[in-house]
Image (cartoon, rainbow, N blue to C red):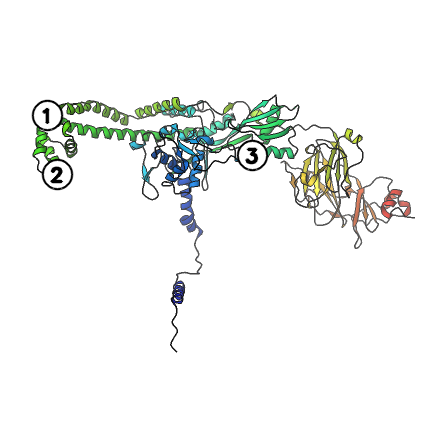
Amino acid sequence: MPPRKSSKKTEKAKTTNISNAYIENAGVVIDQPIVNTIETNYMPYVMSVILSRAIPEIDGFKPSHRKLLYTMYTMGLLNGPRTKSANIVGQTMKLNPHGDSAIYETMVRMARGNESLLYPYVDSKGNFGKAYSSNMEYAAARYTEAKLDNICAELFRDIDHDTVDFVDNYDNTMKEPTLLPVAFPSVLINYNMGIAVGMASNICSFNMEEICRATIQLLRDPDADISGTVLAPDFPGGGYILHELTEMDKIIESGDGRVMVRAKYNYDQKNNCIEITELPPNVTVETVIDKLTALVKLGKLREISDVRDETDLGGLKLTMDLKRGVDADKLMNRLFTMTPLQNAFKCNFNVLIGGAPQVLGVKPLLLEWCAFREECVKRRVYFDLQKKKDRLHLLKGLEKILLDIDKAIRIVRETEEESEVVPNLMIGFGIDEIQAEYVAEIKLRHLNREYILARTNDIASLKAEIAKLEDILARRSKVRDIIISELETIIKKYAKPRKSVILYDVAQEAAEEVEEVPDYPVNIFLTKEGYFKKVTPQSLRMSGEHKLKEGDSLQYSIETTNNTGLLFFTDKAQVYKSECASFADTKISLLGEYVPAKLQMEEGERVIGMVAVNEYVGYMLFFYENGRVAKVDMSAYETKTKRKKLLNAYCDKFPLTALFYIKEETEFMLKASSGRILLLHSALLTSKTTKDTQGIIAMQLKKNAFVSEVEPFREGTLGNAYRFRAKNLPSSGAIPRDEDLGEQLALDLFGENKE
């Protein structure tokens, strides 16, 4: 029987299997030093992020910003009409190979409508969102329009005069500038933030006039003190800057410091409300509202009855309705410490200088910009100089023709071959090839004395201009004078008043104010189900019975004051710290506040005990069913920070029967399920500072017996009390006789039918 022919599909599969079998090192694990992996894989990525993405350069732009603005410049959007943003995004992708959404978001942040920049670079039309609101989303690129703002003329000044270097784009089809020849220190004029790998940059914005004036100072004297000129940052959102001389000096010298900014508000007496009209940088309306709402829910902010966002076409407005009799200024001073209405801007002036990241202060950064701008001006002057020299060279050749125009015409007419015209002119008049080429291209109608004399009259003015340009290149002071003149012009055209107002000598006001808690007598109650009531004595006298849920009962009742601290112990061996003042006054006829929800306890967590404490003195006693007793020093629950929850509040290895807080040593009566009673004095116990200590065995129990109840001992409760007192620990206690039992104790132990 002949062998069956395999199909083409089978042959292909066999070929594939055979080829896979010979893959080199397939399935072999090769050890590779992690240092080599980092050098070959990770470090190139790190350098790419730092140099080509996240850190701005001396012109104040990251590559994504620069590519977008240059694309708009080449599209004629500096002086022309606006065009659809989608068109701009599409053209930018020729230089920036990232997605359209990333490019459009970059443009949104630079747009006038977004209000992110102090001096916007994009003149926008349409909805570009707002920097102070996370809910106000910008419209899609197909709906909005944009062009370059007028100030961009200073970014691209003389860019066509070889002022900066150009490189190929990512596919070598276009050229793009490595830097923009900015005519003012844009690196400090607008906010710029970037996060690289292992480093970041956070540059705040400054007022243009202040920065330009300081730059002029440094151009005239590099050692000048600019602290009197650059007063403080200036943010696009306005607000009040709390001037701190030490921090400002650090920002000017090292570029590392912080600026405290407060929101601007006004009090509407007619409607009894506060209107927030300006916010600190990087703070949104939604963030403030969320924080205010949380404080109200926690009971820490009772002066506000309502808060709402009333932002409209007129600008930002966050309104807070106040309750009657509230002092608006005092409330705002509290809110400045409790909410983002006062926020710190952390400065980190990290800039790429010559391809290397450096953290520089305002003054060193301006000096670097001056050096950069000097180079741009020198290159521009040199470019103009070469153009004028070339023009002069051509005119000198034309001047020689003036001596004998007929000879020039005769040479051209009598030359048989076109290629010989230029060489014959060179020989006939003693000029070089460039000059002869220029003469040969002159139209026949211009070969007259009048035209040639008019052209050659420019020679004198050209020589004067060339001498002037050469003098500028030879003298650094001349270059600096040009920069100063340009800065003065920019100040006149674009400078505007500060948006952020500077407040001096407010360090004391800025300090955190302690909320004044009104102190008055209160009665507090806690039920077994975890409901808390705080009732004033007057309300208590006028009330009837407690309102409780079915099956619930009162567990704790304490007379104290409103500023007393509270510790809530739970069945998960945790303690939650709170204050009486954080709970609202209520009535006996109401259920009260549910503590697990109020304190945001874990799901299923239950309150088993409450302690009212003003000072952390005394002891906590924990009685366990197995007869153990733990005595913990109260200082173990004291914290320096405002922590709301402490773990391991007591030992959870054994079932807990009861817990008590004592300020002084006292005696307790322990009842066992076997009927035995033990009187235990707390002085016999040694205190521990460890919260979850297991304590010691105080009551010795028989098999299957357990401590069922513990209460403070009151004289007269037991007859012959000496029989039950523990002299040494552990102690078994004693079984009470009839003569030892008072009426109430007999009822507790044996019920009403005891005979």
Number of marks in picture: 3
Left or right of residue 630: residue 403: left
* Residue 403: numbered disc: 1
Amino acid beneath label 1: Leu
Residue 225 shows in the view: no
Instruction: Please name the amino acid that badge 2 sits on.
Output: Ser
Left or right, 42 with reference to 594: left
Along the line of sight, the residue nearer the viewer: 256 or 584: 584
Residue at 15 percent across and 23 percent down: it is 450
Q: Residue 63 or 514: which is nearer the viewer?
A: 63
Q: Position of residue 11 (x, y in %)?
A: 38, 67
In the image, residue 341 sits, relative to residue 696, either above or below, namely above
In which quadrant of the rendered image does the N terminus lie? bottom left
Residue contact at pointers 2 and 1, CB within 8 angstroms: no
**Which residue position holds label 2?**
419
Which of the 4 image quarters holds residue 559?
Answer: top right
Report the side of 133 relative to 42 (left or right): right
In the image, taking residue 683 as reference, residue 172 lies left or right, namely: left
The residue sitting at 66% across, 33% down in the picture is 299
Circle 1 residues within 10 Å: few <14, some 14–19, many ≥20? few
Could you tell me the amino acid type at mark 3? Thr
Which mark is first along the chain, 1 or 2?
1
Contact check, label 2 and label 3, Cβ < 8 Å = no
Mark 3 highlights which residue? 287
The image quadrant of residue 602 is top right
